[in-house]
Amino acid sequence: MKGPPQKTEDMTIMLERRLSRNRERLIGMTDEERAWRAKFLKDQILDPCEPVIPSDYYKKRYNPIRRFYRAPLDKVENMLVPLVGSTWADGLRHITAKSIMGIIFIYSACYYFKYNGHDWTKSGGWRTSFSRIKQFPSDPGFPSTEVRCKGNEFAKYGFDKSPI
């Protein structure tokens, strides 16, 4: 015996019956179908205060940790709702949150690059290397690059500036 489908969100309920198709409407309706259609159309009219959001909806939807870190921007959003409306307030809240996360990411990356560079004292860190610029004999100031002759002048990684 087969149980109910596991994905119930894929199942649709056909509320309009056969009247959802234009050609079927031309056939005509029985009295039972007319009564059902009138009831269906009456049910589509919503109350002016709908949708009704239950009072404990927010607590049940979000866990305590998420409620904690959402609290500051929720307060800002609630202050913006009378000024710009709920849709714009929600959009501004979303943009503000993503901007703050982006700034935190950029600051963290800058801090990491600045203080965790690769040098001779440790094996980790970001290795940054710069390519030489292209120069031709016809360029003014040719050759303007530093000339390296000895083996200890390559891949120094700060060893030459060490106070040791």
Image (cartoon, rainbow, N blue to C red):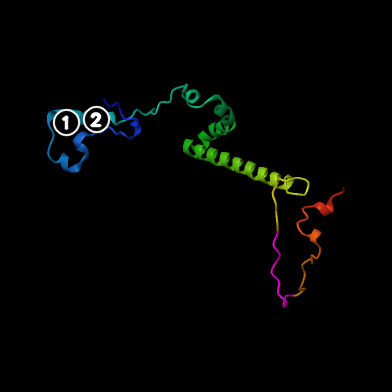
Q: Which residue is mark 1?
A: 34
Q: Dividing the picture into quarters, in which one does residue 53 lie?
A: top left
As drawn, the residue found furthest toward the bottom would be 138
- Identify the main secondary structure in magenta: loop
Question: Is 136 covered by the magenta stretch?
Answer: yes
Is residue 5 or residue 10 the one in the foreground?
5
At x 29% / y 34%, what residue is drawn? 12
At x 69% / y 69%, what residue is drawn? 134
* Placement of the N terminus among the 4 image quadrants: top left
Q: Which residues are magenta?
A: 130-139
Is residue 163 or residue 13 the one in the foreground?
163
Mark 1 residue crowding within 10 angstroms, few (<14) / some (14–19) / many (20+): few
Drawn side of residue 50 relative to residue 101, left or right: left
Please tell me whether mark 2 sits on a helix, a strand or a loop. Answer: helix
The correct choice, above or below, for 20 with respect to 114 in the image is above
User: What's the distance in space between the residues labelled 2 and 1, CA to CA?
Assistant: 10 Å
> x, y percentage for residue 54?
44, 23
As drawn, the residue found furthest toward the front would be 151
Q: Dividing the picture into quarters, in which one does residue 95 lie?
A: top right
Is residue 9 or residue 119 the one in the foreground?
119
> x, y percentage for residue 7?
35, 32
> x, y percentage for residue 149?
80, 65
Question: Is 45 covered by the magenta stretch?
Answer: no
**Circle nearer the N terminus (2, 1):** 1
Q: Which residue is mark 2?
A: 40
Drawn side of residue 121 relative to residue 14, left or right: right
Which numbered disc covers residue 53? none
The correct choice, above or below, for 124 with respect to 81 in the image is below
Mark 2 residue crowding within 10 angstroms, few (<14) / some (14–19) / many (20+): few
